[in-house]
């Protein structure tokens, strides 16, 4: 046997290695008798992550995919031409753009409603095939009663699917499937990753045939999460609960602070009913007092511990203006329709000491108050 051939076929015996954690399976192919078959179909790191996520959200099936948007794309792919999709008005800007693009290209009807108002349920067309919403919503953190929507929609069309984007509530505080949703999805790029370093998305369901249909879409469409990413997210999930509890405690402290500050016109925080949503933490919105709105950039620049990147829900704090950031892809008219103006600010609280964050916020508010005061012409 030539050395070249020997080198190509050299393998250690994996069975006896017994590592403390599952190593990264950087292998696109598996032996013909392996249940993993091919890494576009399945991979041990993805399978382990899915087991963790299914346990957290008490779901029969979890599917890990490349990012939150691919989870939403796969959901919309369930629709056929001529069918009706209902979405909530308050939703992440890119999700909204995707609904519009898909509706136009695939020939399904898009209906946009404010589902946080129970009287609007009557406006849902009886033939609706799929309803998709976030709760709490991005922006404004409005909450939607999942069971009420599910019962209303399924009374008219039992085949209809209820899909909840559970990214902001997280499985620690909300289990949509237990409240009548057929599918729960996540941008795991947020709290699951938690460190702003890896993209991923998740779809969860208790329904075998629906999960199988989505697995087929993932296999043929090539959306399976890469093993390296799955490994990182799986590692992050070991500290998920501890991180969430810290995010929550800091968010509650900052909520109390913001409510007392004269520069803040309004603070947005979700309604925790203890039944569907059992807690909340991480992200808040507030609107700047009207005369301070032009000073948002100065406010953001003055903050020392809040980054201005697009990331959020991670170990470091972030500040953003949804009007020019997360909802930039919406037209001014669409933003006006949802009441989204330049006064709205999003704060994501990381794991810094809350006292440092408080001092930072107070200093930034004082800086814009001083700047606005300096520019206001003195009374004659
Ligand atoms: N859903 C929500 C609620 C989001 O906030 C985001 C991104 O910010 C997404 C979905 C999209 O996720 P990703 O960026 O992982 O594709």
Image (spheres, rainbow, N blue to C red):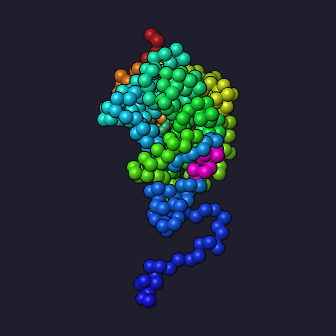
| Residue found at x 42% / y 88% | 2
65 falls in the magenta region: no
Q: Of 7 and 84, which appears nearest the observer?
A: 84
Instruction: Judge whether residue 292 can be spotted in this image.
Output: no
Relative image position of residue 167 (x, y in whole percent): 54, 38
Q: Taking 76 as reference, is 363 left or right? A: right
Q: Residue furthest top?
A: 380
Where is residue 257, by image quadrant? top right
The quarter of the image holding the C terminus is top left
Instruction: Judge whether residue 276 can be spotted in this image.
Output: yes
52 falls in the magenta region: yes
| Residue found at x 68% / y 36% | 249
Q: Of 103 and 365, which appears nearest the observer?
A: 103
The quarter of the image holding the N terminus is bottom left
Q: Which residues are magenta?
A: 49-56
Relative image position of residue 157 (x, y in whole percent): 48, 25
| Rendered position, 158 above or below 244 | above
Q: Main secondary structure of the magenta part?
A: helix
């Amino acid at each position: 046997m030539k050395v070249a051939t020997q080198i190509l076929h050299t393998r250690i015996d994996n069975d006896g290695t017994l590592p403390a954690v599952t190593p990264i399976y950087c292998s696109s192919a598996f032996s013909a008798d392996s249940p993993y078959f091919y890494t576009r179909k399945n991979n041990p790191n993805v399978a382990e992550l899915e087991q963790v996520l299914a346990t957290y959200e008490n779901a029969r099936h979890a599917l890990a995919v490349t990012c939150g948007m691919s989870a939403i794309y796969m959901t919309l792919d369930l629709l056929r031409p001529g069918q009706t999709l209902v979405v909530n008005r308050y939703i992440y800007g890119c999700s909204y753009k995707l609904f519009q693009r898909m509706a136009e290209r695939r020939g399904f009807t898009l209906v946009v409603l404010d589902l946080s108002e129970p009287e609007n349920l009557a406006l849902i067309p009886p033939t609706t095939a799929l309803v998709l919403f976030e709760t709490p919503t991005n922006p404004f953190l409005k909450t939607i009663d999942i069971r009420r929507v599910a019962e209303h929609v399924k009374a008219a069309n039992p085949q209809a699917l209820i899909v909840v984007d559970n990214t902001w509530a997280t499985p620690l505080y909300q289990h949509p499937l237990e409240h009548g949703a057929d599918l729960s999805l996540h941008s795991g790029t947020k709290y699951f990753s938690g460190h702003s370093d890896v993209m991923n998305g998740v779809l969860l369901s208790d329904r075998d045939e629906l999960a199988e249909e989505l697995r087929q879409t993932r296999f043929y469409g090539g959306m399976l999460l890469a093993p390296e990413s799955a490994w990182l997210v799986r590692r992050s999930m070991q500290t998920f609960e501890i991180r969430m509890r810290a995010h929550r405690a800091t968010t509650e402290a900052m909520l109390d602070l913001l409510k007392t500050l004269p520069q803040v016109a309004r603070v947005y925080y979700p309604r925790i009913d203890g039944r569907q949503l059992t807690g909340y933490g991480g992200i808040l919105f507030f609107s700047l007092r009207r005369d301070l709105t032009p000073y948002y950039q100065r406010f953001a620049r003055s903050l020392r511990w809040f980054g201005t990147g697009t990331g959020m829900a991670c170990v470091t704090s972030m500040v953003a203006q949804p009007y020019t950031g997360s909802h930039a892809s919406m037209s001014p008219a669409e933003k006006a329709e949802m009441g989204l103006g330049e006064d709205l600010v999003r704060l994501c609280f990381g794991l810094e000491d809350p006292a440092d964050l408080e001092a930072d916020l107070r200093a930034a508010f004082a800086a814009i108050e001083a700047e606005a005061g300096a520019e206001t012409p003195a009374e004659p």
